[in-house]
Image (tube, rainbow, N blue to C red):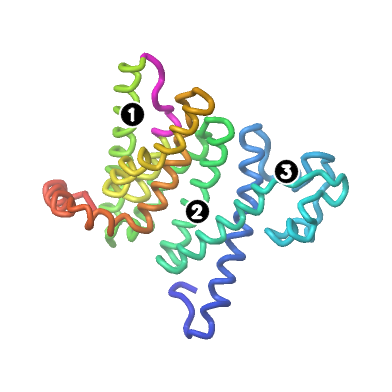
Amino acid sequence: MDGGPNGSNDIFLYYLAWFAIGACIGSFLNVCIYRMPKDRSIVWPGSHCPGCEHPIAWYDNLPILSFICLRRRCRHCRAAISWRYPLVEALTGALTVAIAARFGAWPLGVVYIAFVAVLIVISFIDYDTKLIPNILSVGGLVASLILSPLVPALHGTTDGVLAFGRAALGAMVGCSLLYLTGSIGELIFRKEAMGLGDVDLLAMAGAFLGWKLVLLTFFLAPLLAVVPGVVVLMTKRSHEIPYGPFLSIGLIVSLFFGQQIIHASGIEETIRLLSDAYGWAR
């Protein structure tokens, strides 16, 4: 399963299988999104209704299908099931298929699926709480630094030492960009302008994707946040919006289309010159 389907007749079943795998991952992500902000174990107890706390049987816990069959109601207490559950499952399934199609299953596909899964959890938790758990951002940073020499293809090389150097550079660039931006914003507005969770998130992403794509994300995320920010300002009279979801969307866009955007933007030559000057740059 490392390259894709062998024949055209197998393509549908191949990607259907990947969608099912992704949806199952999404089901677990729903558990993480619900329990992690409450400091509860994501392993024990098993899945249960948050209303009546009745354990959910396996046939009522099938991603997307159970939501449809149960008509969005708990079998026991008839409490409504949030639309977020099938949304996260379908989103994770779709992105899993896209990653498998673009990068193959192994090794890049598996690593990128894990990376995107972390981004999904971070986005929904940040949306709810305006906080990003350190276990996801800092833990992801540590994991990416460990994985880089083991999967050097993440950074376009076969040399594990070089891959680690590029991962470290990407982490430093990602961290520095948001930290400096937050510091400048704090001086101007005299209050915290950027949460440290966002800084850790971009550091983790830089270690996974390299400094070029994290730099692109730094410029993409504010563009993605403009319209929602204006809506929040007009409706809630607040300048505060969770930034993690926009960073995550920018990172996913960069993962799939970053190289094309960099090339089309006309800065490819500038980056190439920097790459020549700093041998680590991807």
Q: Foreground: 12 or 43? A: 12
Q: Position of residue 93 (x, y in %)?
A: 56, 60
Q: Which residues make up the magenta segment?
A: 190-199
Residue in view at x 53 percent, y 28 percent: 235
Q: Amino acid at mark 1?
A: Tyr
- The mark closer to the camera, 2 or 1, is 1
Find numbered disc 3 in the image and state the secondary structure of the residue it sits on: loop
Residue in view at x 78 percent, y 57 percent: 60
- The mark closer to the camera, 2 or 3, is 2
- Residue furthest to the right in view is 76
Q: Quadrant of residue 103?
A: bottom left
In space, the residues marked 2 and 3 are separated at their CA atoms by 21 Å
Q: Position of residue 167 (x, y in %)?
A: 32, 47
In space, the residues marked 1 and 3 are separated at their CA atoms by 36 Å
In space, the residues marked 2 and 1 are separated at their CA atoms by 25 Å
Q: Which residue is mark 3?
A: 44
Q: Which residue is mark 1?
A: 179
